[in-house]
Image (cartoon, rainbow, N blue to C red):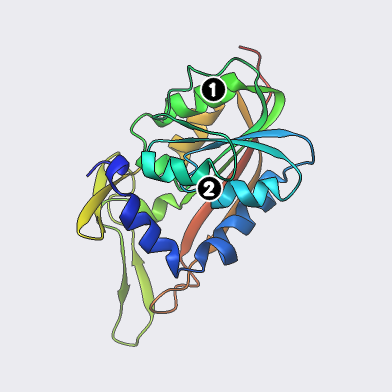
Amino acid sequence: MSWSELADWWMSEIADDPAYEEVITPILLDILQPQSGRTYLDLGCGEGRVMRAVADRSAVVHGVELNRQLARLAIEIAPTVLGELPNLGFLGDDSYDGAYCVLVLEHIVDHRGLFREAARVVKMGGRFALVMNHPVWTSPGSTPIEDFDGEILWRPGSYFSTGATDAPAGKDRIVFHHRTFSAVLNAAANAGWCLDKVIETPHHDRFDQSGIPRLLACRWRRTVER
């Protein structure tokens, strides 16, 4: 199922889920540190809830969203373009002070292209922030398991593969593309991004998973001229 057809599932998924307000958005604000008056691009903005948080810091924010229904909601918060990542050809070079991407990279086939396009539209010295499901979580076959003593362990699955997995999305399915942490870092470096901060968080769900990484957040600065 294409993300462009999953708006109803997404809105029902987040309706009663406090994760965005309590975990995801705070991590993005921590890693991005949006500054008043600066311009930022939200890559895969969904219905716009993260854009609202960035705008609340007196920053200027624009969005790009694949799903037409979600884009209609996002545009009520900030200017939003309907587009499919990683293509940002409708934007000029050096257009923004920063860009960010929240829980989107793992749904994009061409992750290298996203880093390259972000580097093109962000000004020299600007920031790119990424929040994603930790790669140890997305590898094919990975899953939490409970041993006979009730301890939660982690089966890493095929971590060094470059495969993808289908996950339930209501009555449909959604694809998660798996990349190792090194593949993400190398793609960013090759696009001219210099890493300056990383955050890893644990996850608490049906059972205690405090020893298992759940989210990965990174911040880069553009340091290489095209």
Is residue 49 visible from the viewing direction of this image? yes
Badge 1 element = loop
Residue found at x 34% / y 88%: 149
Give whichever of discs 2 and 1 has the lower sequence position: 2
Residue type pointed to by label 1: Ala
- Between the C-alphas of marks 2 and 1, the distance is 27 Å
Residue 54, horizontal then vertical, whole percent: 67, 47
Q: Residues within 10 Å of mark 1 (few under 14, many from 20)?
A: many
Residue type pointed to by label 2: Gly
**Vertical position of residue 79 compared to residue 206: above or below:** above
Indicate the quadrant containing the N terminus: top left, top right, bottom left or bottom right.
top left
For label 2, the residue is 48
Q: Residues within 10 Å of mark 2 (few under 14, many from 20)?
A: many
Residue found at x 62% / y 50%: 52
Residue 118, horizontal then vertical, whole percent: 55, 26
Q: Nearer the viewer, residue 190 or 43?
A: 43
Residue found at x 45% / y 53%: 134
For label 1, the residue is 191
Residue found at x 50% / y 42%: 45
**Vertical position of residue 188 compared to residue 75: above or below:** above
Image quarter of residue 223: top right
User: Is label 2 or label 1 in front?
Assistant: 2
Badge 2 element = loop
Q: Are marks 2 and 1 in contact (CB under 8 Å)?
A: no
Image quarter of residue 125: top right
Residue 120, horizontal then vertical, whole percent: 58, 19
Left or right relative to 75: residue 162: left
For the view shown, which residue lies furthest in the right direction? 36
